[in-house]
Amino acid sequence: MPDNLASSRLTIPEIALGSRETIWDLSRWLYRGAAGAHHRTVYAEIRAGRWGEMDVCRVELVRAIHTAITSKIVRGGARATARNEVIAMNSFVRWVDGNDHLFESRGVIDAYMHWTDSLVHDVQVRKIFSNKTAYSRARAVGVILDLALERRSAIIRSTRLKQPGAARKVQGARSENQNLEETFAFGRLLQDICDAITLDALWGPSPLRIPLSGGGELLHYSGRPAPPVAPSTCESHIRRFEKRKERFDNDKTLRTRYPIANMRILAELLTFIAQTGMNLAQAHQLTLCQFSYASDVDGYKVRDYKARRRGEVLFVIYREYRSHFERYLAWRRSVFPADSRLFPVFRFTTFVSTPPCFIQIQQACRQVGVRWITPRVLRSTRINWLLRRSGDPDLTADMAQHHRQSLIENYARPSLQRTMGEVARFWRQTDPHLALSSHVKSIAPGECDGAPCTVPDRPRNAPLPDCTRASGCLWCEHHRDIDSQDYVWALSCFRHLKILEMARYRPALGDRVTHPAEHAIDRISRKLTWFQRSNATRRSWVEESLTRVEEGDYHPEWKRLIVAMEGGEG
């Protein structure tokens, strides 16, 4: 490698690393094919000459990509996001090397377009992964290329990949109540776990017995040797098992007790997310500080204590959670005195930025028959509860640390109960008929408030509403239809009466004025058509009513007038 290139830094030490990770280095992209090699051995292989000479044409683009990634981190971008972008870019470079495309400033756009086409093929034909996965990978690479090439428009908009829309399920009253009940049951399980795993229980005998508030208990074996299951097991096997169990119980270190400690830490982490609304990616990386509590309107603003400034606000908690949180801090300092993390989950992964796995909590949920609630659903439930209690999207977005648009598009769920309440309040305030203490029976079929008011679209020679003529009610703003079969039957008979009235009408020669009864027939017909097209139940009402009219079975309100009209025709 030339001296001027050897001295150039292509590493990204800002990305969080695990205990056995090496610093991310983008220099492997300067060698064709090296992106597909194992990251632990690729740099030794490069020095040994396995991947040939460096491609000088790639230097400009790789430097620009390195600058784009590091600048995003410096501006406050998440290190976990930068790590995902490097992984996605490495996947893109590996595809470029395998398909003989150019990875340089003048040809990378064409290579990116072909790569996204291959992702579309993988989604639609090969069905390797979902459209959401393909779009997230292409977007991670596209964002970095946009910055590296100083593009003014997003390159991903020129591809055939489309951002998947959020699939929102229809929310009913039953599903809303069920969701809250399941969340409350999950919260009670987390509380039981936190209450049961004390210091005495952590270092005590195994298995750990966790009493449940709803009755019963949860057993946790902490990975100790399983007892012999066969009743005819020889005495030597039983003695060996007893010795192993004794050694296990006498080992008062985290070497044997870390599964129990992890279980409480995971339960405390989920409780913390439900109380603060913080992202899992942020919450599990918090460090232990000397917390200071500043009383707020409905809780506490927790700060990192500093002698003069008292630090910035870390998170906000409710008053009732403070005692629980302080109890956990005392337990955590006793068990993990040397660990700086607030939630020091013991695990074997090498990636510090990787969120912990909640397998133990999921297993506990299966044992007791409680639905497992993911951290994202916990945050979403909290946000929607706040939104419904406050009715203020701006306040809720501020408490959830979102923009208002992000809150509405990604988190807010429509509430059937809230919608029904809002609609009912609106009509009680704006509908004079509903504002009355008792309903008034109108002269025509239906109900009213006894105060005639003409609708704007009344035909010129249609009857005026005056509470004396039944046909006038059809053009009154205060007239209300009734959602019942009896009303549809009365409406059909009223129309039949108007048809008889039209049959007896003999207009004068040259008279082209529409008879008022004809307007009434048209309006009633439109009402019956709406009922017929609304749903199957109302359609059966209309069909039954028309059949009764044809058979001469008239509504009691109109029977006398119809019979008199029919008798006078002869």
Image (tube, helix red, strand yellow):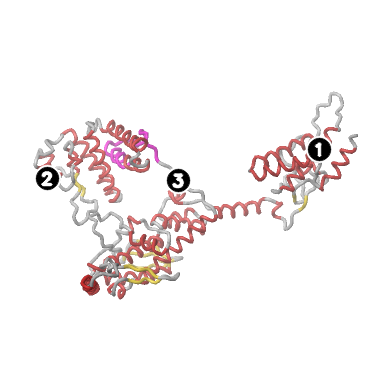
Question: What is the distance, in whole Å, between disc 2 and disc 1 at their CAs?
Answer: 97 Å
Q: Which residue is tagged 2?
A: 44
Q: Nearer the viewer, residue 410 or 553?
A: 553
Question: What is the distance, in whole Å, between disc 1 and disc 3 at their CAs?
Answer: 51 Å
In-image side of 325 versus 60 (left or right): right
Find residue 414 and name its label: none
The C terminus sits in image quarter: top right
Mark 2 and mark 1 lie on one chain; the one further toward the N terminus is 2
Q: Is residue 154 magenta?
A: yes
Q: Position of residue 475 (x, y in %)?
A: 75, 41
Which structural element holds mark 3? loop
Q: Position of residue 29 (x, y in %)?
A: 19, 39
Residue 173 vertical placement versus 220 (above, below): above
Question: What is the distance, in whole Å, between disc 3 and disc 2 at their CAs?
Answer: 47 Å
Q: Is residue 444 magenta?
A: no
Q: Which residue is tagged 3?
A: 167
Which structural element holds mark 2? helix
Q: Position of residue 337 (x, y in %)?
A: 24, 69
In-image side of 86 versus 457 (left or right): left
Q: Which residue is tagged 1?
A: 498
Residue 447 vertical placement versus 287 (above, below): above
Q: Amino acid at mark 1?
A: Lys
Which structural element holds mark 1? helix
Residues packed near mark 3 inside 10 Å, few (<14), some (14 to 19) or many (20 plus): few
The stretch in magenta equals 139-163
In-image side of 539 versus 197 (left or right): right
Residues packed near mark 2 inside 10 Å, few (<14), some (14 to 19) or many (20 plus): few
Mark 1 and mark 3 lie on one chain; the one further toward the N terminus is 3
